[in-house]
């Protein structure tokens, strides 16, 4: 008589340990990223990149400033309409002159909740960057001191850098040019 296969009760459960989280070799970066358990770090074409939940952006910026990242060199947004599950992404490049480091922080932003904590309380120079992102993409920055349009007229409808914004035909009149008729 053939032997029966062991039942589920006879098999010991084997626990598989999760793979250790990838952190950068640089001690300043490792200390910065380690407390943010949801943050993912990668090296992309030689640049340190952190993928971070949008809710943690303000707290991460404060930690980065305390770690020696003195400057937000750039803040921008990307519209991935139809290309990724989460439509928008806010991208901030932080610089540390003290440590000779640059870190790119990427935060996915869903279309149905286009709100992100402002970097302005930590990096005042991010003011115009965030206003431009609001104006062009419609992403608002919570805690920003003046979340108003910066490039488009105040009565403009829509956000021109969204991929679903209609191109249309809008005449442009430059100050020193001949009048458009």
Image (tube, grey):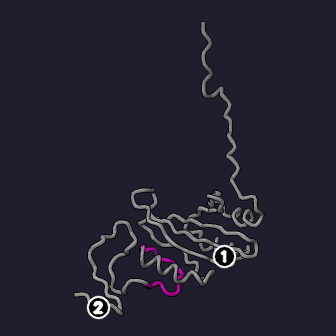
Nearest the eye: 80 or 4? 80
Residue 13: % across, % down: 66, 34
Residue 26 horizontal side relative to residue 86, left or right = right
Residue labelled with disc 2: 178
Task: Give the secondary structure at mark 2.
Answer: loop
Residue labelled with disc 1: 62
Q: Earlier in the sequence, mark 1 or mark 2?
A: 1
User: Quick one: which residue is furthest to the bottom in this view?
Assistant: 176
Residue 51 horizontal side relative to residue 173, left or right = right
In magenta, the rendered stretch is 137-150
User: Quick one: which residue is furthest to the right in this view?
Assistant: 27
Task: Give the secondary structure at mark 1.
Answer: helix
Residue 118: % across, % down: 55, 78
**Neighbourhood count class around disc 2 (C-alpha, 10 Å): few under 14, some 14–19, many 20 upward:** few
* Magenta segment main secondary structure: loop
**Residue at 27% over, 91% down:** 179
Residue 38 horizontal side relative to residue 167, left or right = right
With respect to residue 147, does 102 lie above or below? Answer: above
**Residue at 35% over, 88% down:** 174
Q: Quadrant of the N terminus?
A: top right
């Amino acid at each position: 008589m053939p032997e029966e296969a062991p039942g589920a009760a006879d098999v010991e459960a084997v626990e598989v340990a999760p793979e250790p989280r990838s952190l950068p070799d640089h001690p300043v970066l490792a200390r910065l990223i380690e407390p943010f358990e949801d943050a993912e770090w990668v090296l992309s074409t030689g640049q340190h990149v952190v993928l971070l939940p949008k809710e943690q952006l303000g707290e991460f910026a404060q930690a980065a400033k305390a770690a020696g990242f003195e400057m937000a060199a750039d803040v921008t947004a990307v519209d991935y309409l139809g290309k990724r599950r989460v439509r928008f992404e806010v991208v901030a490049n932080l610089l540390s002159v003290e440590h000779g480091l640059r870190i790119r922080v990427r935060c996915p932003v869903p279309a149905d909740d286009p709100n992100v904590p402002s970097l302005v309380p930590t990096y005042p120079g991010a003011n115009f960057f965030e206003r431009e992102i609001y104006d062009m993409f419609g992403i608002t920055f919570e805690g920003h001191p003046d979340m108003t349009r910066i490039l488009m007229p105040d009565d403009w409808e829509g956000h021109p850098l969204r991929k679903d914004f209609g191109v249309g035909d809008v005449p442009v009149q430059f100050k020193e040019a001949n009048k458009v008729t």
